[in-house]
Amino acid sequence: MAVAFFDLDKTLIAANSGSLWVRRELELGHITRWQAVRASLWIARYHLGFVSMRDALERAVALLAGSRARPIQQRTADFYEQTVRSLYRPGALVAVEEHRRAGDRLALLTSSSGYLSEWVARELRLDAVLCNRFEVDAEGLHTGRPLGPICFGEGKLTYAEGYAREVGVPLAACAFYTDSYSDLSVLEVVGRPVAVHPDHRLKREARKRGWPVVSWGVPSGGGAMSLPPAPPVVPSTGP
């Protein structure tokens, strides 16, 4: 038995869910145009190397302070069903099933929120969700603090190491599929690092190291049409 770790954005799905979420929240009136612009600027600054995504994620979590968890959970459920569910790459579904048939454990390793990640895990019948979760107080309000380390960069390695240790599998026996150079710390320690539709830095690194570079295709007319309907879920009061 091994563990197959999968990134979400631009790997399992053919888009960045964070950008889509900001756009949807703006369209529905849950955030202002200025808040949307500010979020877009943070993303742009990250891609230009002016700010770390860890800082951006910590800032985003802090901005949740005082907001009720349940409405955001419900909006995330709608977002998943109406937007994300149609974005799975065909090859991603094949890879997940191949690892399942091989008896491997399947783990989502993503910087996305637990609210979204749990829907992905339920749809794909994954064994573990390693992601960013938010602290919620007894009254159902976000505190503005993350639960555990930020799951990005070295933080992803911390989560991967912890899960591998928990199930008794060395990382050298595991696989990791991702599109992003920011996941290099995990790619370097697993036995099967795979670059899926990689960004230019990861593509260059993968070719230099002899890692597989694969294409999982793009959804055609709805990437999740071959999947059965996701089971109904009543969102919990916490992450």
Image (cartoon, rainbow, N blue to C red):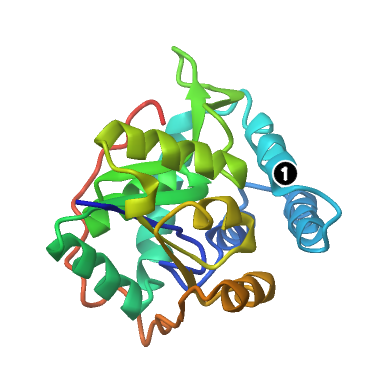
> Which quadrant of the structure image shows residue 100?
bottom left
Q: Is residue 201 left or right of residue 71?
A: right
Which residue of the protein is positioned furthest toward the bottom in this rendering? 220
Q: Residue, x 49% and y 73% (percent of image)?
A: 211
Residue highlighted by disc 1: 56
Percent coordinates x, y for residue 217 in the rendering: 41, 84
Pick the front one: 218 or 5: 5
In the displayed structure, would residue 70 be above or below residue 135?
Answer: below
Q: Residue, x 62% and y 76% (percent of image)?
A: 208
Pick the front one: 199 or 55: 199
The residue tagged with tag 1: helix, strand or loop?
helix
In the displayed structure, would residue 153 be above or below residue 48?
Answer: above
Regarding residue 86, the answer to whether it shows in the image is: yes
Q: Residue, x 67% and y 30% (percent of image)?
A: 62
Percent coordinates x, y for residue 190 in the rendering: 43, 54
Q: Quadrant of the C terminus?
A: top left
Percent coordinates x, y for residue 80 in the rendering: 39, 57
Q: Is residue 14 left or right of residue 200?
A: left
Category of crowding for the residue at label 1, using alpha-carbon neighbours closer than 10 angstroms: few (below 14), some (14–19), many (at least 20): some
Q: Is residue 113 left or right of residue 117?
A: right
In the displayed structure, would residue 221 be above or below residue 210?
Answer: below
Percent coordinates x, y for residue 40 in the rendering: 75, 58
Which residue of the protein is positioned furthest toward the right in this rendering? 50
In the displayed structure, would residue 189 be above or below residue 66?
Answer: below
Pick the front one: 98 or 17: 98
Residue type pointed to by label 1: Ala
Regarding residue 77, the answer to whether it shows in the image is: no
Q: Is residue 166 left or right of residue 161?
A: left
